Amino acid sequence: MFTEPRSDRAAMNNARVLAVLLAFLPACHEARPRETQGPVLEFGFEDSCRPDAVAELALEASPRGITFVTGIEGRAARFDDSGASVRLAGIERLELSDSMTLEFFVNLADWHNPYGEGTMKNLISYSDAFAVAVRGWALEARVTTAGAKKAQRFSGGSFAPDAWHHVALVVDGAQGSARLVLDGRDVARTSVQGNVVIEAAHELVVGSWFEEEENFSGVLDSVRLWPRALSADELRARAALLERHGVEPAPRG
């Protein structure tokens, strides 16, 4: 009777063990769902202007002109036409890079700036590094990145007064683009390159930037700043909260 050499039997056994291990290897190393980064800054406006943030920020809020009302997600902040604002210093501590998303719910008051209808209504701005405003009733954004000498300005979509909307400014470094999203739909886009320009001397301003030129009158809710570009699905899900709460977004021009 032929007997396999011991070395051959050992090799075959090792091969069988290896085959079993390889069979289980994919199950042991299944890709786990990637953990997505949450917001680095959030204004919940639950009867307070103090935000939640991943770093210590200096807060300054107008003593008058801001009240709290029912919003889309709990409470919201109502800004009258007196030039009220909330200002934050230390945004550089949030460590934003080439991608970010600024998103929020807004309900603009049917208010006419005495300085002219062409004047801009500031919603949220960080100087010209990133900003969202309304000129007349048209949505407008500014973004400054390291690859540009000045701010990129782009606009699209329009508002109706006294109606809730979801707005997002998305800077996507991987795609080399910045876009405005209104109620889950892209309404404007521009090309960008490099990190968003963050300077310690600037403040993040929620509400009126300048009392005369960039006044704001209306309600803001759930202002969030993310260190990544939110996906189209994520933004549509945020916008869908309007309908879930019985709010019909107004028709856009």
Image (spheres, rainbow, N blue to C red):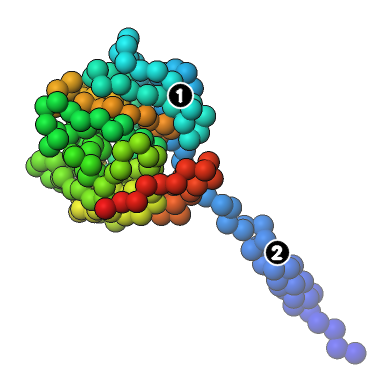
Q: Amino acid at mark 2?
A: Phe
Q: Is residue 232 above or below residue 136?
A: below
Outermost top residue = 63
Whether residue 141 is situated above or below residue 25 in the rendered picture: above
Identify the residue at image location x=18%, y=20%.
Answer: 211
Q: Which residue is mark 2?
A: 24
Q: Residue at x 40, y 18 (%)?
A: 67
Measured as percent of width and height from the top left, residue 202 is found at: 21, 24
Q: Quadrant of residue 45?
A: top left
* Quarter-of-image position of residue 226: top left
Q: Can you say which quadrant of the picture contains the N terminus?
A: bottom right
Callout 1, which amino acid? Val
Residue 143 - label: none
Judge whether residue 42 can be spotted in this image: no
Circle 1 is placed at which residue position? 69
| Residue at x 27% of width, y 18% of height | 84
User: Around disc 2, counting alpha carbons within 10 Å, would you say few (fewer than 14), some (14 to 19), or many (20 or more)?
Assistant: few
Q: What count of labels does the image hold?
A: 2
Choose mark 2 or mark 1, whichever is in front: 1
